Amino acid sequence: MNRLLIRAYAPVVRWAIRYRAMVIGGAVLLIAFTIPVWFRLSGEFMPPLNEGVIMYMPTAPPGMAIAAASHVLEAMDKDLKSFPEVASVFGKNGRAETPTDAAPFGMVETTIVLKPRDQWRAGVTWDRLIGEMDAKLHYPGMPNIFWMPIQTRTEMLSTGVRSPLGIEVFGDNLEQIEKTAIAIEKAVANVPGTRSAFADRSTGGFYIDLVIKRAEAARLGLTVGDINDVIQTAIGGMDVSETVEGRERYSINVRYAREYRDDPSMLDKVMVATPMGAQVPLSQVVDVKTVMGPPMIRSEDGKLVGFVFLDTTRPMSDYVADAKAVIARDVELKGVRIEWVGQFQYAARANAKLKIFVPITLMIVFFFLYLNTRSLVETGIVLLAVPFSLVGAIWLVYLLDYNVSVAVSVGMIALAGLDAETGVVMLLYLTLAHKQWNDDGRLETRDDLREAIVEGAAHRIRPKLMTVLTMMIGLIPVFWSSGTGADVMKRIAAPMVGGLVTSFLLELLVYPAVFSIWKGRHLPLARALPSATATPDTEVTP
């Protein structure tokens, strides 16, 4: 096997050295042709971490009735359970019994547990299944948002956004914030790739205001505090004591029974005691009004803020670029400012850090290579493998239809270390063969240098091939993996596998050509012929 490799590769080395200008120029052209492909790749923060469970989160405007919400939730669960790939569906409206879950009542959180992949219909993928669900579930005023439970919770805790992408609208006036958010919702709804867009309504809550009639209260000898105490005690409730049961503490709250306060018309009949001992109805000293107000007030960076939630089907970088252009053209941002949050915010931070860490990584690789070779030229030759490897990395990512993400960037950073390893092995055998020929006195012409390079390159092809194949064989099975985390691992492995292939192939051709230029610049083309006037002592005998 080794002899076959040598016989096959030795003529290639001689050809590469003979036409070294063409070989090096071809490598440069190949790198140049790869640059446009790199700019055609879309960007994202991280690929979806498939949890095997879907979180369906439509949200209705404030003011949804309990009966209507229950009916809609049952209908949604029934529609979702009709898909053969769904194992179970559990829907929830509103908030749980905990102060950490501030979800409004119109917010639905439905957990969809899926069956194993081998029980799915033929040809159905994750994206296709979500597309079918989105097409079937259409409820007026409740745009669809599909995500995953764990990722949804972490995003909501860190940014407050319950969708993969969001827009924050900052301002000083809630009405202006809501107006701008609704305008953005309508504008981005026409952007290609928008599955749903929903602007949080900042002023859509229903409230009952009790406005005290000060003149009437004064006539009866009542103060504003007296009336507020009655309102708090009878309607809102007042803690008067505390009960101790073992290690548990419970407050004792006093207020009217529910049937005396669950209807706004009943509030008029709440009795207020005057200093004279008379009992007067609350309506005599208070105007009861139904008003609209904010269901929830959010603030950030010292400003009031509203959200626009976006669920998209396109790569994030392309979608955000188009959406920004549409918003700048169609939405008047008067008295407010906007910021993109969610996955886009994370991607921007990651890209900023990568711009720092990638050069640092290359500098560290360069430093350790220099410590090993003690030669700037040899270190530079080894680092030629980096642009060679990027050719395969970029093309494989493009062919697999992956987006550039942190996972792909991590794979490319790891690839730099693998490139250095393969480059060092190649250059080591070339240097050893050159040194041996030079010590033996056989290195006199460029033809001798060519044969020395053939010996160093072709006669040591097997250990070089084993070095590269060992790394590739360990990475290739990742492409057949499935389950949680598989998508991330594939995007880390893709640039490494593609880069190893092209870096190794180009090293086999370009390294011998570059090495021959470097070491052969002071060597003659051929041995000098003996002079015709040579003395007998210097004659060459046949």
Image (tube, rainbow, N blue to C red):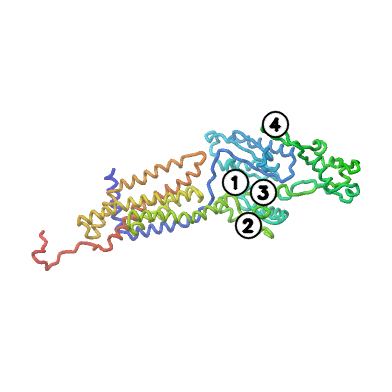
Identify which amino acid the numbered label 3 is placed on.
Answer: Phe
Q: In the current view of this chain or complex, which residue is farthest to the left?
A: 536
Q: In the current view of this chain or complex, which residue is farthest to the top?
A: 246
Q: Are circles 2 and 1 on residues that touch, CB within 8 Å?
A: no
Relative image position of residue 370 (x, y in whole percent): 35, 56
Identify which amino acid the numbered label 1 is placed on.
Answer: Glu
Q: Residue at left 71%, top 35%?
A: 250
Task: Tell me the CA gap for discs 3 and 1.
Answer: 17 Å
Instruction: Name the disc covering residue 245, or none.
Output: 4
Q: Nearer the viewer, residue 26 or 503?
A: 503
Residue 514: name its quadrant: bottom left
Q: Secondary structure at mark 2?
A: helix
Identify which amino acid the numbered label 2 is placed on.
Answer: Val
Neighbourhood count class around disc 3 (C-alpha, 10 Å): few under 14, some 14–19, many 20 upward: many
Neighbourhood count class around disc 1 (C-alpha, 10 Å): few under 14, some 14–19, many 20 upward: some
Q: Secondary structure at mark 1?
A: helix
Residue 70: name its quadrant: top right
Relative image position of residue 175 (x, y in whole percent): 73, 54
Q: Secondary structure at mark 4?
A: strand
Q: Secondary structure at mark 3?
A: strand
Instruction: Name the disc covering residue 198, or none.
Output: 3
Q: Are circles 3 and 1 on residues that touch, CB within 8 Å?
A: no
Q: Nearer the viewer, mark 2 or mark 3?
A: 3
